[in-house]
Amino acid sequence: MVQPSGARTSRAPITGKPRNARQQLGRRSEQLAARHLVSQGYTILDTNVRFPVGEIDLIAQDGQTLCFVEVRSTTTDQFGGALASITDRKRRHLIGAAQWYLQRIKRMPPEIRFDVVAIDWRADGEPSVEVVQGAFTGDDA
């Protein structure tokens, strides 16, 4: 597991107890996303890494590619679903956090990618999981 110096993991790790329903949904979604990515061949390196500019939900390896993964979830498609919830501001925060992370690791990976795992929790309880590889680039800041 890569742990950059100066990085802070969240006070409530992925296995910790969230305080409210929204946090519970977020933790459940992050756990589902991690399991789904592992089933797709990814290796999860770290979770909930915080920097002054933002948090990275999951840091994973997909072959030679280091992936910064944002997990988005929703229980309704009223506002366009989970993917539609990624704003320009959120992208800038993710890119900034990734830059902090990259400054702290010992060697630069051959490839870097920003992925999104979008989870739409349906009324019947069955989640729909979509992985968008290369959802945006570092130039989107």
Image (cartoon, rainbow, N blue to C red):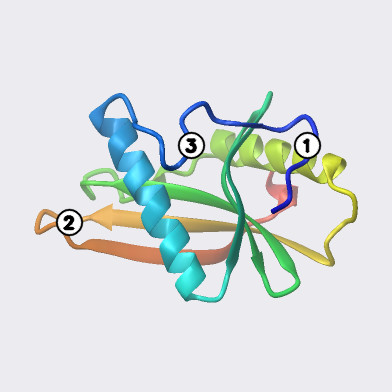
Relative placement, left or right, of 86 versus 62 is left
Residue receiving disc 1: 100
Residue receiving disc 2: 122
1 or 3: tag closer to the N-terminus: 3
Relative placement, left or right, of 70 versus 109 is left
At horizontal 72% and vertical 33% (from top left) the residue drawn is 7
Return the residue nearer the eye: 106 or 117.
Answer: 106
At horizontal 68% and vertical 23% (from top left) the residue drawn is 52
Q: CA distance from mark 3 to mark 2?
A: 25 Å
At horizontal 50% and vertical 75% (from top left) the residue drawn is 40
At horizontal 47% and vertical 44% (from top left) the residue drawn is 86
In this view, the residue farthest toward the right is 107
Three-letter code for the amino acid on which mark 2 is drawn? Arg
Q: Position of residue 118 (x, y in %)?
A: 40, 56
Three-letter code for the amino acid on which mark 3 is drawn? Pro
User: Residue 61, relative to residue 29: is it above or below?
Assistant: below
Residue receiving disc 3: 13
Three-letter code for the amino acid on which mark 1 is drawn? Trp
Where disc 1 sits, the SS reads: helix
Where disc 2 sits, the SS reads: loop
Q: Position of residue 116 (x, y in %)?
A: 51, 56
Q: CA distance from mark 1 to mark 3?
A: 20 Å
Q: Quadrant of the C terminus?
A: top right
Camera-side mark, 1 or 3:
3
Q: Position of residue 111 (x, y in %)?
A: 79, 66
Q: CA distance from mark 1 to mark 2?
A: 36 Å
